[in-house]
Amino acid sequence: MYTQALNTREAIGPVEDPEHEARFQARVDGEEKVEPNDWMPEAYRRLLVRQISQHAHSEIVGMLPEGNWITRAPTLRRKAALLAKVQDEGGHGLYLYAAAETLDVSREELVEQLLAGKAKYSSIFNYPTLTWADIGAVGWLVDGAAIMNQIPLCRCSYGPYARAMIRICKEESFHQRQGYEIILTLSRGTAEQKAMAQGALNRWWWPSLMMFGPSDKESQHSDKSMRWKVKRFSNDELRQKFVDATVPQGLYLGLTFPDPELRFDEASGHWAFGAIDFDELRQVIAGNGPCNHERMKARRKAHDDGAWVREAALAYAEKRRSRRDTARAA
Amino acid sequence: MTTIIAADAPLVQYALRLADNALVLGHRLSEWCGHAPMLEEDIALANIALDLIGQARPLYAYAAELEGEGRNEDKLAYLRDASQYRNVLLVEQPNGDFAVTIVRQFLYAAFMAPFWRLLAGSRDATFAAIAAKAEKEAAYHLRHSAEWLIRLGDGTPESHARAQAALDELWMYTGELFEADAIERGLIERGVALDPQTLRPEWDETVDRVLGEATLKRPPDGWMQTGGRTGRHSEHLGFILADMQFLQRAYPGATW
Ligand SMILES: [Fe+2]
Ligand SMILES: [Fe+2]
């Protein structure tokens, strides 16, 4: 899950209908699922549309950095696994757009917002995949961070989103294991391969920690999201869980983390880590990451180049319908 | 050892021809992943590419086993140079626009769907088993590409023009599908391989039916390009292999 860009401050709007709202909150508090036809506060609907669509866009843009290496994968087994993984991400995009569409917004509208630069997607995908080891690192760290974020979303109050997440989480954890296995193979390989694995970890570690968004001190948005049981853990809680799970995995491989302050804190039982450069995160979100322009250009190009195909499909469907109507009338 | 030459035993060569067709076309289709005209097609083209790579792998493994040189699927795929590749020219042609990709897929699948169906009756048990699985996949590839070709041909004036142009451009690569040389003759006589000429009527029928529905004109059978199956390729294959084989070439002997 890639919601860090959601952490913008937005006041909880005026209560539209106190009676409905109270009933709604009671249902949410009772862990009942909200379904598309149920009454819901407009702000709840908007929050979900934004979060689900950002998540969908992230899946789609995320196909690009990994897709980069499909033609260059080093063995047929790796090639098939990577292609299947990128295909899964496309499938995640599809389920998520479908989940968003249950909230009265069309996929076309959402895609337009992305292409117009009005919608956000996870800034992690604005980093380049420079070596084959990056494919391992993305699976291990990026899918790994995604899972930390997404597992609680399987219990999200909005039914269609929660159900989409259950399916997606299964595949993400497979991706994470697959990525780790690539890094493991490299770290047991030649000196050059080990260096490749270490280089990828060095480049992807901090951006992965940034996937959890600003620190809790800086983000106030969570109140509403927590109250409505869309979000269940704070950014910092999830980030800590990720660090605790991931550091031992890296150390096991004999890799080092690019953080001199990283150490196990006996007292708390957690891995303590250095300060995150949130300026970098802000810059990447603002469009200044190494690949923001390329990613958006690639998405726009695919969309523009494909316009005549989509038009043809529509025109053909239209012709068929009218032929069928004519045949029926005759 | 950075470049290998596969054994020239007919059975090995036959397995390689089939494997190389599948891998090279799978490679081409995989280039679309993330760039297709719609999300559904990103997924569908990746699906077809996965089927094709999945067909290539046991064929390479079988070729390696028949060779008995201790090679495996990856050595055969990653360490042969272009002149050692045995695929038909059609499958290495660039993706072009979506119409070119669909026409290429359709022309190939219209041949391979009946091919695998009949090869499932091969006297060679390994070919028969691979064919039995590939048959269902190829039938889907044919259905998918035929549906798209009809949509494009009978869609808008632009899509019609693009589909016709793609057909006209690729037609000269269809003749090679039906060639059988001395390497294959012996295998055909033993009931191991298929005589591609026997597939001609079904291929013609499929092509004519789909082109008719797509309101497209079948190009005349003019000069046909050939050479892929003996290692004389277009310029495109070298670039495909430069991408595909990069890591194996740059780090010889490493395990991935
Ligand atoms: Fe995903
Ligand atoms: Fe994933």
Image (spheres, grey):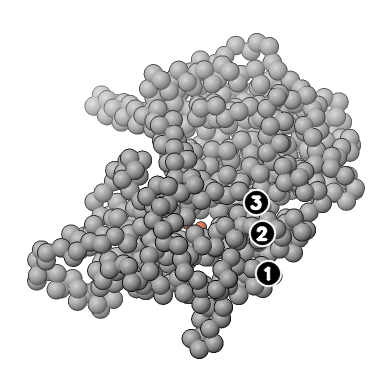
- Give the residue type at disc 2: Ala
The residue beneath circle 2 is: A197
Q: Is ligand 2 within 8 Å of the beta carbon of the residue shown at mark 3?
A: no
Which label sits on residue A81? none
In the image: residue B91, left or right of residue B194: left
- Give the residue type at disc 3: Trp
Does residue A323 appear in the picture of this structure?
A: yes
Q: Are marks 2 and 1 in contact (CB under 8 Å)?
A: yes
The residue beneath circle 3 is: A132
The residue beneath circle 1 is: A253
Quadrant position of residue A2: bottom left
Q: Are marks 1 and 3 in contact (CB under 8 Å)?
A: no
The earlier-in-sequence mark between 2 and 3 is 3
Q: Chain of mark 2?
A: A
Image quadrant in which the N terminus of chain B is located: top right
SS at mark 2?
A: helix
Q: Whole-Å distance between the Cαs marked 1 and 3?
A: 17 Å
Q: Nearer the viewer, residue B155 or A102?
A: A102
Q: Is ligand 2 within 8 Å of the beta carbon of the residue shown at mark 1?
A: no
Q: Whole-Å distance between the Cαs marked 2 and 3?
A: 9 Å
Q: Is residue A313 above or below residue A61?
A: above
Q: Is residue A42 above or below residue A309?
A: below
Could you confirm whether marks 2 and 3 are on the same chain?
yes
- Give the residue type at disc 1: Leu
SS at mark 1?
A: loop
**Circle 1 crowding by C-alpha within 10 Å: few under 14, some 14–19, many from 20:** some
